[in-house]
Image: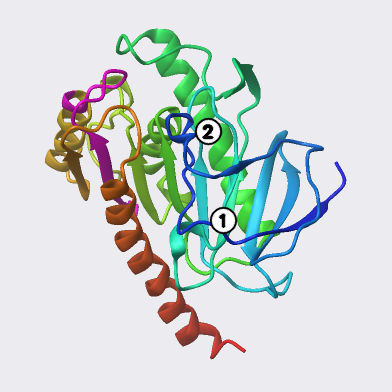
Amino acid sequence: MPVKSIVVRTLLFMVTLTAAAQSSCVASHTAGEWSPDAGDVVVRELRLLGIDYLEVVPVGTAANADLPMIVFFHGRGDRPHTPRGRFMGLEDPVRLIVPRAPSRYGFGFSWLPVSARDGESPELVEALRETGAHLANLIEGLQDRHRTLGSPIVMGFSQGGMLTYTLAVNHPEVVGAAFPLAGWLPPSLMPEQRREHTTYPMIRALHGADDPVLSASRTVRATRELEARGFAATVRTFEDVPHEMSDAMWQHLREHVAREVRKRFIVGRRRIGPFV
């Protein structure tokens, strides 16, 4: 697939990447829908291991720049969205990677062939295992393709949140920090214990307390069980929020992601010297 570069105008403080938040002025694009524009970020449409994805970096960023990587997995029926400005208003530059799920679903795309609305099923667990393994290979390949400071910060909404959990506990070697948003980890995918000599990422889950699709109680139980098994996992629920990301959730996420990004620059400078 040819590589296309565009520049997108700055209009938003942050990008909302969920189908439930279509009211925020976020530009949605798929393959072949690009048009040049002037602004603060450069977007390239790329493909790796059969997955189309967007790479978003600040204008003026060198192609071989060492940057922290954020990988965001969209939810069921959604698609990649382009931030009109720096992702979530982060002060430090990052390389945002937004993969597109492979299967058509409604007006968008889906990572999994079954819904998690009714809880765990053999089909759901198997799909999460297979898709998680493929996305772990994708993230590994992304690090080979794009120069990356530290391990990637992985996050996702709904189905993307479930995949974020799956990657963090079953493929920790490709995740530096995990932020599942309105997601859930089925009990069958939960390791009995941490593997020896393995570094696991911090998991910080955010969930709307009034979510009618993936109930917050399921996420709270799963996260607390992970914590009981030795994982650095926490969850915070937000009152009166359904299956979407509220402003308060975005702000909370931004604060913690900003810390993770800053840590990668500090460690990176120690290892390779000052950035110019």
**Front-most of residues 89 and 204:** 89
* Numbered mark located on residue 96 in the image: 1
Which sits earlier in the primary sequence, circle 1 or circle 2?
A: 1
Q: Give the residues in magenta.
A: 196-217
- The reply to whether callout 1 and callout 2 are in contact (CB within 8 Å) is no
**Residue 209 part of the magenta-drawn span:** yes
User: Which residue in the protein does label 2 denote?
Assistant: 133
* Numbered mark located on residue 138 in the image: none
- Left/right placement of residue 270 relative to residue 7 reads left
Residue 195 on image: x %, y %: 30, 44
Task: Tell me the residue at 56%/56% (across/down).
Answer: 96
| Residue type pointed to by label 1 | Leu
**Quarter where residue 224 is shown:** top left
Task: Tell me the residue at 27%/18% (across/down).
Answer: 212
**Quarter where residue 67 is shown:** bottom right
- Left/right placement of residue 46 relative to residue 250 reads right
Distance between mark 1 and mark 2 Cα atoms = 21 Å
| Residue type pointed to by label 2 | Ala
